[in-house]
Image (cartoon, helix red, strand yellow):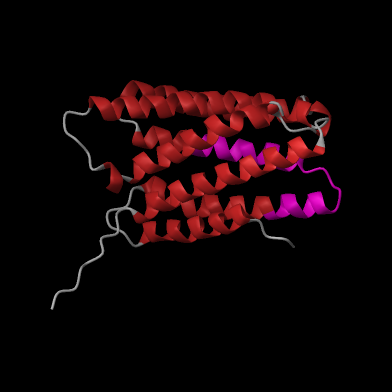
Amino acid sequence: MKVSVDFIFLIVCSIASITAFFQKPSPFYLRLFPFYFLVTLLVQQIGIYLSQHSIHNAILYSIYAMLEFPFYFFVLRFIIQNNKVKKVILIILILYSLTAALNLIFFRQGGTFHTVNYGIGCSLIVIFCIVYFVELFQLPKTLDLKREPAFWICTAIFFSYVCTFPFWGLVGFLSAAPPFILKKLETILLIINILSYSLFTIAFLCRIRIRKSTL
């Protein structure tokens, strides 16, 4: 089975996330990422296998999105400080999970990728990421962002969804696009994934301090 470059970056990111168990103190949401990345690795490999055997994998990724968005809602709820926003995120997390499941069950869209679920999830995630960034600007004291995992994670999530939303939101219309355009879009997605996984990797390694040896 052919392994893509972004898949290698995902593996590196997954290994880096395990360090959350060895860094004290480590927030609960950080310790959930290794399991999330493990599921992501499995889904990607299954998706590639299905594609190589001419089996539709749209439903697989639609089901995965039902895990992906609630997970990121939970992460953002953890890192955002405003209690009112936390309550809103919790309500949206529950409502989104229910409506996405109902949409998947009763409105199957002919076996295609669920762009409605994805579009709504993307929009909400981006809004809450912006809320987090606004909170950073309003903090009474300056944080050392280069050693702040929440900042790098939120940046990775924000970057990923802002860049991929136009593609996945219009994926139904792209099926009829010329092959050379699809190839260029595939390359763009590859670059976006590599950069996103790199930001996640920084998030898990940024707290590690390397001691300089002295003579």
State the image coordinates of residue 9 (x, y, percent, origin top left). Answer: 54, 56
Q: Quadrant of the C terminus?
A: bottom left
Q: Is 196 above or below relative to 45?
A: above
State the image coordinates of residue 194 (x, y, percent, origin top left). Answer: 54, 49
Q: Is residue 126 visible?
A: yes
- Give, as a single range, the part of the protein colored magenta: 45-72
Q: Main secondary structure of the magenta part?
A: helix
Near-viewer residue (167 or 60) = 167
Q: Is residue 102 visible?
A: no
Near-viewer residue (157 or 213) = 213
Residue occupying image coordinates x 44% and y 59%: 16
Q: Is 64 above or below relative to 91?
A: below
Quadrant in the rendering for residue 189: top right
| Residue 165 located within the stretch drawn in magenta | no
Give the residue at the far bottom of this rendering.
215
Near-viewer residue (130 or 33) = 130
Drawn side of residue 205 relative to residue 118, left or right: left
Residue occupying image coordinates x 42% and y 29%: 129
Q: Quadrant of the N terminus?
A: bottom right
State the image coordinates of residue 138 (x, y, percent, origin top left). Answer: 24, 24
| Residue 54 located within the stretch drawn in magenta | yes
Residue occupying image coordinates x 41% and y 37%: 154
Give the residue at the far left of this rendering.
215
Drawn side of residue 212 relative to residue 197, left or right: left
Give the residue at the far front of this rendering.
180
